Image (cartoon, rainbow, N blue to C red):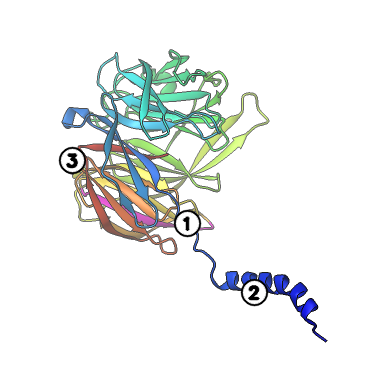
Amino acid sequence: MLTRRRFLLLLPAATASAQDLASLFHKKKPAPPPPVRVYFGTDTMKGAKGIYQSRFDTLTGHLTPPLLAAATARPSFLALTPARGGPRYLYAVNAINDPAATVSSFAMEKNGGLRYIGKVLSGGAGPAYVSVDSTGNSAFVANYFGSTVASFRIEPDGDLSSPVERIDFNDHAKFGALGPNAARQDRSHPHCTTISPDNRFLLVCDLGTDHISVFSIDPETARLTTSQPYLFTNGRPGSGNRHVVFHPNGRWLYGINEIDSTIDHYLWTETHALKPAEGLLVTTNHHVSTIAKDFPAEKNTAAEIAVSPDGDFLYASNRGEDTLVVFAIDANHGRLTLVQRISSGGKTPRHFTLDPTAQWILCGNQDSANVTVFRREQGTGRLTGPVQTVSIDSPMYTLFA
């Protein structure tokens, strides 16, 4: 029998249960993810002033208008130290064709601004690429016109040391003979310093010799521990190696060739039993063209390459044809099949990148002064858009932070 006293005792529990039940049907929607920060490196010889920052909404695919974050000369390539709870540092090559070219260091501030720390000589003319190892202790720079690769220690305050090592790639007895394209392959042109997924090897594409050099590295000291580099080639002289990217499985490597607008598939393996360890590439003899069959090869230079985080699709850009190209990656053998060719939404798409959610691609069109945003369908890899076009003088590089 439910007495008045018993009713009063049970009332709070019943009320709480009712509130709990109501909350099941009226749950608050989760807050949308905050916009992420993005930096743009630009060509200051064509009207821009340095590194710009913007905010990117990963739900809508929209950028805020870019604002100048740091004035610096021709920051054509950027790299960040890893996020480890402390301050983060950004490095920008100052891509000037002068032996006194530099690499500039900046501290990232909470509002996205970049506080200038200092600059050091890059070790050669025309620095074109900078990479930071996963510990945040070392940085590596490819000097395109200077025909050198230089390594640097990252100091506790984020500044770079003077070059720890400086390697001259014009030693053709060591780094291979020049390719047959006299206009483009007049000397060695190191174009990238890509670090392997295990942080133990450095891969350097030399556009001038059509070779990929592999060094073992010591991230703590920024020293290249391989006295004699291991050289690999696709066997097609005149192709002009530019950049490489690792597949998420760590066993496949894809290289984009600037001169003949092709992509090569390599197998990657490591022999850690040897001292120093060796990183080895084997060509699968599978390559694809990045341009349409009816587009004149001499009017195009292939530029950037990226693989989706799920490993199912590969993306590339063409300067001349002015397209982004999508390839499906065969899960068993790594071979590429064309999925889509789409206009970049501008002229000369030098660099593009996937956003942190892999739902969008941002493409910097250098000679039409804009950045275009494309939606990416994760199931098919296909791109739609541009969903937005943002004006910015001569974008050369895009970096999410």
Residue designated by label 2? 18
- In the displayed structure, 286 sits above or below 93; it is below
- Give how far apart the Cα atoms at labels 1 and 3 are: 38 Å
- From the image, state whether disc 2 or disc 1 is nearer to you: 2
Q: Earlier in the sequence, mark 2 or mark 1?
A: 2
- Give how far apart the Cα atoms at labels 2 and 1 are: 25 Å
- In this rendering, would 320 be left or right of 41? left
- Give how far apart the Cα atoms at labels 3 and 2 are: 63 Å
Amino acid type indicated by mark 1 = Ala
Q: Is residue 356 visible?
A: yes
Give neighbour class at mark 1: few <14, some 14-19, many 20+ (Cα, 10 Å). Answer: few
Amino acid type indicated by mark 3 = Asp
Residue designated by label 3? 367
Find the residue positioned furthest to the right: 1
Residue in the image at 22% along x and 49% along y: 322
- In this rendering, would 147 be left or right of 370? right
Range of magenta residues: 321-332
- In the displayed structure, 62 sits above or below 243; it is below
Looking at the rendered structure, which numbered label has been put on residue 31? 1
Residue in the image at 17% along x and 31% along y: 46
Q: Position of residue 332 (x, y in %)?
A: 54, 57
Q: Nearer the viewer, residue 155 or 77?
A: 155
Q: Is residue 206 visible?
A: no
Image quarter hosting the N terminus: bottom right
Q: Nearer the viewer, residue 23 or 9?
A: 9
Which element type, helix, strand or loop, lies under badge 3? helix
- In the displayed structure, 351 sits above or below 335; it is above
Give neighbour class at mark 3: few <14, some 14-19, many 20+ (Cα, 10 Å). Answer: some
